[in-house]
Image (spheres, grey):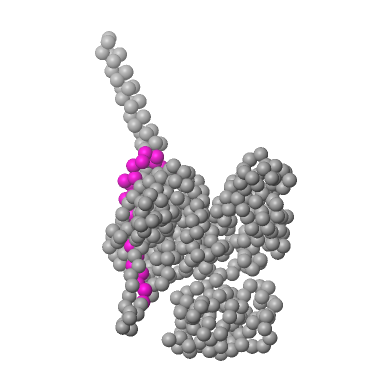
């Protein structure tokens, strides 16, 4: 009798144990194979990939602090970059200077994101994959303001990293950095997120949009352009800088957030330059003194110091003295947070702003504009050939085309000491013809420039000066 009762109990216990083990493996245990399968099976175009819903998903698959599987997956998608710059030494002999860095494959068809400063002066770029295969890369586009560049190699079916939602990552979370410090390929280091929305004046531009992720992950020279990843192998940032007295890692490193990088990559692929949305306002953080002056119960939001009369914010009813609290329901407490969020959008996008005026909360919809206060997509081009000439160009916007009855291109800037400056070209010059051929777009201009010989004849005009202005540019 006793043995007959024991056997069913044993069977029930075994069954329960098997059910618990099965539940753990299916519901709790980290499924890293799922990540790898998703990456390999994501056979879509880069445009679909960057704007698909899956890109923004960031469902944690592990919080154990065990990075072995995440590291193995991610290392396959981080590449070694050698950027060669042409130089001439003191005895007039040509040579090359090598810049070493890292890059991240963001699509299976060979698209790679890296830092702009890694390839800034490169005449040609070599890419080495984790499997030691080597390729020459072409530059799809660059953005010096965010220190990002998009490269392309002729390869298919590459392992790549899926963009995570960098807005969702929190201070204290574990992350990995993968790069090639000092040329040591596929180096993995670990640490935690130390802070978000840091502005360290990384770029030389007064209108920089820095809102960097700070971590204590070790990165060193050669790691620039590498990946900052989460425990579930999502790309959370592009490693870009350290703060150091010695020039090497001293405990603080910074990465460009994935949400910013994703948008920059898409714009560079689609337009060759970043489409930046503007609201036409000047901001400052709300501190305790300002909050007291405004009779606010909490220190929060960003204060509108000025609002341009032709800007998007003014059109939406926002004015000087308002305090912006949220963009699309996301809390904004610093100007870097504001710029980071705003730069996920383009001219023509509409966003919802929550703000305070006279202690009352208001909501408004803002139709974002570009730096010309239109909703056109206007891309400033800066290719190696243009840098050789010393100019930046863009297409005319719809208002300029109608006003001048032309479809030429606009010279945005002229570099000091360049051949363009020596030819007396000034910013604001509208180029209508090159070597007698009419210009209708920046792409056409770039093709004609690349085919031209050492002398180019330009015909155009300035809106502020009467008459036509022909120029002759001689390239050494």
Judged left or right of residue 256, residue 154 is: left
Considering the image in quadrants, where does the C terminus appear?
bottom left
Judged left or right of residue 62, residue 47 is: right
Is residue 440 among what the camera can see?
no
- The answer to which quarter of the image holds residue 304 is bottom right
Counting from the top left corner in percent of width and height, residue 475 is at: 45, 86
Considering the image in quadrants, where does the N terminus appear?
top left
Q: 54 and 253: which one is in front?
A: 253
The residue positioned farthest toward the top in the image shown = 1
Is residue 303 among what the camera can see?
yes
Q: What stretch is highlighted in magenta?
A: 60-86
Q: 87 and 110: which one is in front?
A: 87
| Residue 305 magenta | no
Counting from the top left corner in percent of width and height, residue 433 is at: 57, 86
Q: 26 and 185: which one is in front?
A: 185
The residue positioned farthest toward the left in the image shown = 3
Look at 51% across and 51% down and name the residue there: 197
Look at 51% across and 69% down and name the residue there: 272
Above or below 128: residue 74: above
Counting from the top left corner in percent of width and height, residue 382 is at: 50, 73
Above or below 217: residue 202: below
- The answer to which quarter of the image holds residue 43 is bottom left
Look at 36% across and 41% down and name the residue there: 65
Look at 32% across and 51% down and name the residue there: 188
State how many labels appear. 0
Counting from the top left corner in percent of width and height, residue 397 is at: 63, 72
Above or below 389: residue 328: above
């Amino acid at each position: 009798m006793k043995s007959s009762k024991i056997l069913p109990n044993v069977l029930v216990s075994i069954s329960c144990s098997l059910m618990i083990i099965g539940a753990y493996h299916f519901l709790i245990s980290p499924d890293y194979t799922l990540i790898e399968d998703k990456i390999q099976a994501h056979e879509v175009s880069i445009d679909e990939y960057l704007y698909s819903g899956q890109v923004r998903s960031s469902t944690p698959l592990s919080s154990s602090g065990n990075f072995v599987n995440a590291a193995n997956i991610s290392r396959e998608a981080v590449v070694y970059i050698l950027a060669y710059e042409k130089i001439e030494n003191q005895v007039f002999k040509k040579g090359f200077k090598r810049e070493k860095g890292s890059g991240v494959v963001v699509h299976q068809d060979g698209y790679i994101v890296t830092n702009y400063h890694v390839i800034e002066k490169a005449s040609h770029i070599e890419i080495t994959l984790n499997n030691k295969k080597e390729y020459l890369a072409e530059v799809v586009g660059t953005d010096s303001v965010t220190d990002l560049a998009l490269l392309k190699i002729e390869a298919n079916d590459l392992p790549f990293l899926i963009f995570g939602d960098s807005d969702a990552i929190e201070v204290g979370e574990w992350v990995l950095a993968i790069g090639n410090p000092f040329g040591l390929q596929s180096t993995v280091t670990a640490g935690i997120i130390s802070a978000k929305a840091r502005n360290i004046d990384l770029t030389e531009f007064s209108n920089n949009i820095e809102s960097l992720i700070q971590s204590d992950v070790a990165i060193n020279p050669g790691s620039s352009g590498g990946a900052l990843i989460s425990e579930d192998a999502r790309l959370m940032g592009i490693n870009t800088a350290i703060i150091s007295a010695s020039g090497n890692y001293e405990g603080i490193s910074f990465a460009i957030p994935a949400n910013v990088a994703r948008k920059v990559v898409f714009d560079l692929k689609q337009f060759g330059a970043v489409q930046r949305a503007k609201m036409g306002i000047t901001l400052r953080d709300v501190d305790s003194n300002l909050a007291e002056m405004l009779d606010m119960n909490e220190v929060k939001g960003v204060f509108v110091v000025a609002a341009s009369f032709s800007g998007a914010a003014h059109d939406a009813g926002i004015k000087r003295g308002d305090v912006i609290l949220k963009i699309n329901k996301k809390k904004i407490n610093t100007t870097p947070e504001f710029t980071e969020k705003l730069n996920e959008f383009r001219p023509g996008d509409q966003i919802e702003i929550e703000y305070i005026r006279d202690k009352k909360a208001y909501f408004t919809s803002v139709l974002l504009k570009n730096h010309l206060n239109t909703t056109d997509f206007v891309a400033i081009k800066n290719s190696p050939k243009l840098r050789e000439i010393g100019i930046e160009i863009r297409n005319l916007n719809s208002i300029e085309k109608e006003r001048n009855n032309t479809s030429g291109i606009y010279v945005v800037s002229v570099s000091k000491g360049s051949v363009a400056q020596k030819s007396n070209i000034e910013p604001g010059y509208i180029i209508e013809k090159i070597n007698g051929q009419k210009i209708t777009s920046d792409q056409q201009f770039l093709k004609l420039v690349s085919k031209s010989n050492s002398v180019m004849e330009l015909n155009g005009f300035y809106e502020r000066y009467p008459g036509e202005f022909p120029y002759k540019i001689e390239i050494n």
